[in-house]
Image: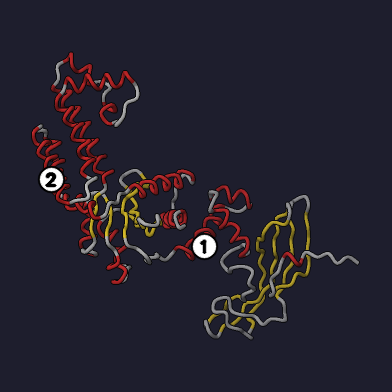
Amino acid sequence: MSTLSIASYFPFRRIRLVDQVVCHKAGEARLEVVPDRRFHPVCHGCGQRSLRTHSWTKRAIRDLDLASARVWLHFEYRKVFCAQCHRIIIEDLEVFDPYLRVTLRLARYIYALCKVMTVKEVAEHVGLDWKTVKNIDKAFLEQEYGKTNYEGLRILAVDEISIRKGHRYLTVVLDYETGRVVWIGKHRRAKTLSSFFNRMTSKQRKALQAIVMDMWDPYIKAVRKKVPHVQIVFDLFHVVAQFNHLIDKVRNSEYRKACQQDKNVFKGAKYLLLRSRLRNRTDRQHLKDLLKLNEVLNTILILRDKLKHIWSYRSRAWAAKALDEWSALAFTLKNRHLTKFSTMLQTYRYGIFNHCDYPIHNGKLEGVNNKIKVIKRKAYGFHDLRYFSLKIIQAFAN
């Protein structure tokens, strides 16, 4: 008599296999499962033992595949009266969740696959609906990353990321020292960032020392209101990006002033002015001719290089002197775009000088934003913003 048995593949102590049917053509295996009567039924909600059975019911639950066969467990289980919960509830067989049609071990397998595959790919692989796969993944993500971890925060980086056309944004808060995405909020308003600080304890707020961000007034307002002791550091990347937009505006205004013969030199020079290095000899000669022709653009490029140099100082006095000299040179051009930009730098000079004490930048967060875009593009977008946020936090958890 053969002693071979598949029971070893189902090491669940509260159930007993009573029958099996294998359909080779359909590639399915059906196993009949009943509760083990050696154990008293326990409530699935509170775990308390119950002696009163209300009724019996049946349900088909999908399990991990066995070889090439899809395995279905056909359960017969009890509904019990729970004195602790004061309601009728199904018994806990330690195999499946009452709200899922898959076993717990299949759910954990799906969750592991979703870390490296898209929901659609996982759904096709296991043979389930994509909504079922997404709900399973989201449930595990809520358990692991649903609560914000504020421990160990000292220096933060804050930035927004566009999620949809029409100025739809998410605010991303990063632990600058570890690279961990701490929190994600909807929109980029002052109350968005304020809600992040509201959930922190007073001790956790006091532990914060500096926050690096761009010159976005709603974020500045939230920081000054909720954590006024924290040093705000403005990121060089965003300032240079704004100055590059200004260069193009100045080029257009100078183009309109130039005579018809000189306008040919301006054409095709947009990106020549924005690049820091030109390897092509033709491009270098084109830029040289343009700068020789126009003194304003020549001065603009000098200002761009000097602007980056301001963030290299470690002394507030030297940084202040460099910024004042930069502004004085900018005012000599008497260009309204440049004057407006210089006034903005003077308004936010405190955040530029704080870089002397905390030489931090948003480079890490820009890298995070690029990876977030990859996650979104790989999934062809997310309809559920909460699920999208949890996926982002998971991607940078380690």
- Mark 1 vs mark 2, CA separation in Å: 54 Å
Q: Quadrant of the N terminus?
A: bottom right
Decide: marks 1, 2 in contact (CB < 8 A)? no
**Residue 388 disc label:** none
Q: Residue at x 62, y 49 (%)?
A: 125
Q: Residue at x 25, y 20 (%)?
A: 267
Question: Which quadrant of the view contains residue 164?
Answer: top left
Q: Assess disc 1: are there few (<14), some (14-19) or many (≥20) residues with their C-alpha within 10 Å of its C-alpha.
A: some
Q: Residue at x 18, y 35 (%)?
A: 303
Q: Position of residue 319 (x, y in %)?
A: 17, 47
> Horizontal placement of 243 versus 153: left or right?
left
Q: Which residue is mark 2?
A: 321
> Horizontal placement of 9 versus 372: left or right?
right
- Colour scheme in the image? secondary structure
Q: Position of residue 315 (x, y in %)?
A: 19, 51
**Residue 140 disc label:** 1
Foreground of the two, 317 or 380: 317
* 116 in relation to 250, above or below: below
* 39 in relation to 363, above or below: below
Q: Position of residue 338 (x, y in %)?
A: 14, 36
User: In the rendered structure, which disc, 1 or 2, sits on the residue that comes first in sequence?
Assistant: 1
* 275 in relation to 356, above or below: above
Q: Does dot 1 land on a helix, a strand or a loop?
A: helix
Taking the view exactly as shown, the residue that stands out farthest to the top is 261
Give amino acid for label 1: Phe
Give amino acid for label 2: Lys
Q: Residue at x 49, y 59 (%)?
A: 138
Foreground of the two, 6 or 16: 6
Between tags 1 and 2, which lies in front?
2
Q: Does dot 2 land on a helix, a strand or a loop?
A: helix
Foreground of the two, 243 or 170: 243
